[in-house]
Amino acid sequence: MLSLSDIHVSYGSVLALKGVSVEVPTGGIVALLGANGAGKTTTLRAISGLLHPTSGTIEFEGERIDRMPAERVVRIGISQVPEGRQIFTELTVMENLRLGAYTRRDRGVRQDLERIISYFPVLGERSGQRAALLSGGEQQMLAIGRALMAKPRVLLLDEPSLGLAPILVGEIFEIIKTINREEQLTILLVEQDASLALAFADYGYVLESGTVAVEATAEELRGNESVRRSYLGY
Amino acid sequence: MSIVVVLASAPPWEDPTLFAQQILSGIASGSLFAILALAIVMIYRSTSVLNFGQGEMGLFGTFIAWSFMTRMDFWPAFFLAILVAAVLGAALERFILRPVADAPVLNSIVVTLGLFIVFNGLSLWIWGSQPKGFGPFSVFKGAPTCVGDVCIGRLSIGILVVTLVIMVLLYLLFQHTRLGLALRATAQNRTASRLVGVPVGNMLSIGWGLAAAVGAVAGVMAAQSLSLTTGTMFAVLLFAFAAAVLGGLDSPVGAVVGGITIGVVKNLAGTYVPPEVGSVDLAVAFLVIILVLMVRPTGLFGRRAVRRV
Amino acid sequence: MRRALLQPRVLWFSLLGVVLIVFPYAHGWPLFDGSINNLGFFTVEITEFRTFNLTMFGVWFLVVMSMNLLTGSSGQISLGHAAVVLVGAYTTGILFVEFGVPLALAVIVAGVFTGVVGGVLIGLPGARLAGPYLAIATFSLIITMPQILKLNGIDSLTNGALGIGIRPVEAPDFVNDVLGAVTGGAVAVDGRQWIYYMTIGTAVLMAVLLWNLTRSRIGRAFVALRDSEIGAEQMGVNVPFYKALAFGISSFYAGIGGGLFFVVQTFVAPESLRFNDSILFLLAVVIGGLGSILGSVFGALFLAFQAELISNLPDWIPGLSRVRDFERLSPVIYGSLLIVTILTFPRGLAGIVQSVRSLGRGGRNGALDLPLLSPIRGALRNLSAGLLGNSDSDGRGKKE
């Protein structure tokens, strides 16, 4: 469904990605693992169009998207939940969700809003409040809800566990899993907490300084000696 | 060197009519500053650019309106000029401001200073230095309305009404439309806006276009009360800055409150400061700016400035 | 020591010095005799007016250095520098006319006074302000300045709207006595020439001081401020203090410039310098190049000759002579220049010279080394190395 082949990305003269190839199958959950600065977030930003690769191709359902600006990428069905959530703190929760559906003009918006509130009831309770007043976990839910409002077929999730209490993280991952199962939503997840990600994903890629070091099914990765030592810590 | 402290006019408690009159006309002239301040605040909020050219862009639009009026009535000329100003504003954002968007603050300030002298110079070159007779026109013309001995001119009422209309329209646009929501989102977080599909570049252009339109309205109203020359907007810009600083550069409500406050203070100073001291209207704006900034470096309604690393 | 004297840089400076010293006398000489010289693209008539022109260059050099110190080195913006220069001019005038202070002393006192006023009254409160707010505050200063200077309470000093005027300055007798004794009566200076030497001399001296300042601890603190206030704070730089200090030193330069402005023009009035001049100063700094002394030289040259350049433009560009009221377009040209420069050469003319210089370096190492060009290139390199010390220190800073 989504396939990256041999993409290179540079920030000025610094090469951040040196030939990364990733396949995300329809309905699957794929995890990108790796240390800080390995290029995980850069990969997501290249897909969502915030960055453009210097070489290599990104295809979504057979269409080249590596030259597309971010505001078009979301239109064709790829939504990103950015690192650090990046919600509109000065707008209300409801306004944030409505902005999520900015690209849509269909009648399903209201229905989707209700559906997302059913996943994250707290967003409904606090819909009139400024998003800045939400707790960290609620803000993460809002960021995910906002991305879902675009009715994406692929959801890019960047470090959803960052700065959250483990219990909340579990809750959020449960909901994502549910959405994945019920709606056939394809998910590409970037996560530093490898054990969490591998418990959740079907397939994983381990990035090391801008290249794919290992790729395998989540199960195999959990069993892989070096992955275990480097990223799982046992 | 001895300055005798004598008020130029009878103090308020002896002549309340004069006092009320001055407050009222202060509110009217203050709303003029408020309109231009609104334009400045709109741009500062959405693009973090302080537009020194705002007044002169408005002046240019007013001259355009004046040219149109040789061929048509006031109202069509007025709206046509506003449209031209809006298109011009959007084009300026696209071609001149966007390239310095990520540069240090200094660069964007230098560019808007460039706009200031370019538009002032263009107005001078095209329309000359002779004052142009400019209104009051249409509904803004007529006998003043009086309640007791306190009177207010038609133009003053007109400026007040125009200010109110602009505020209501902007409020409706920003709070109750999809475009307004996207504009607010863009002002707040450009990356997140792009990720939800808002065409950020277009929003910035629209923001500048809107502000330029509002600035042109300020110009047309200012020219009706002050006559139209290339110097008309100069002092208005200073007072609008004073208003915007008083209100906080990123607060539209602050801009309006600030504008009216400045208008009233300026009028009272003009009435009660004795002529022996000299004229002080500009100095009042200066004092307000300095005092406010000393107490609150980001204005009364402004949020704390985000420091760039 | 001997080798140092023979260095090309020293030679170039000496040559430049000699030219500057004899210049006021040049208008009696062939080529400089007041006839119109066609230099291909530029016609010059060297008359006594040129001496005045170059004297004003000295004044503007001080003003542009002042702006450059503030904006280029410490990263603060001032739209009110015309007002600061006015303070220097007025102080000099008042001291001389009202209190009978000797003119030279009056200029120095005016510089110090302006420096203190600028540092304490503008710099200290301004240190808390973010860029846009400082721009507004200084903008309001220059707009209000004429009204302040015309206030009736102080008109016994400022002479209200009429301003302060003096008779042109004569050269001191002892100077001509000494000159006459030494040269056997061959050389004498008149008042205009005397002012020229004093102004250029002061400007050069102040440039040397500035050069040393930018290399000192204070100069490095300024640059740290400009690059990142938070970073400077972490390095232990007292940010408000150094910002105010930068404003103070900058105002000192502007005050000296203003004092000399008054002496050269023999007159100052509340609107001698206005907001448009502030923008011209900024334009000069931006065109010349931020943060370098060579940039200030270019900027000052621009200020001294801009009016003439504009009026000469129609001679160079054929179509322009048909443009109606071309002279009135000058603000439009300046404004466009300001915008285009910032968009295309954020480092100004000095930046271009630096690039040329590095090109010269590349050429020396590379294959493209035309023997004919190398003396020119070398000269350019040495000249720019001499005037543009900044880049050397930049290089050093990076290695540290």
Image (spheres, rainbow, N blue to C red):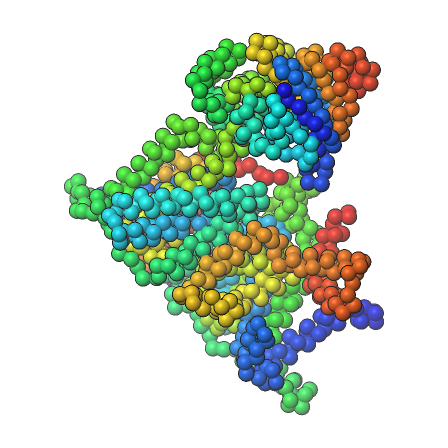
Nearest the eye: C1 or C17 = C17
Question: Left or right: C158 with respect to B219?
Answer: right
Quarter of the view holding residue B39 = top left
User: In the rendered image, is residue B254 in sight?
Assistant: yes
Q: Name which residue lies at 60% across and 82% down.
A: C31
Question: Left or right: B265 with respect to B53?
Answer: left
Task: Assign the N terminus of chain C to one quadrant of the image.
Answer: bottom right
The image position of residue A24, as x and y in percent, is 66, 19
User: In the rendered image, is residue B291 in sight?
Assistant: no
The image position of residue C341, as x and y in percent, is 56, 55
Nearest the eye: A60 or B189 = A60
Image height check: is B79 above or below A20? below
Question: Left or right: A164 with respect to B160?
Answer: right
Quarter of the view holding residue A37 = top right
Given the current orientation, which residue lies at the most extreme front position? A62
The image position of residue C394, as x and y in percent, is 72, 52
Given the current orientation, which residue lies at the most extreme bottom position? C184
Q: Name which residue lies at 52% across and 72% down.
A: C264
Image height check: is A210 above or below C74? above
Nearest the eye: A38 or C247 = A38
Q: Name which residue lies at 80% across and 57% down.
A: C366
Nearest the eye: B36 or A225 = A225
Image height check: is A34 above or below B202? above
What number of labels is visible?
0
The image position of residue A16, as x and y in percent, is 71, 33
Q: Name which residue lies at 51% across and 67% down.
A: C317
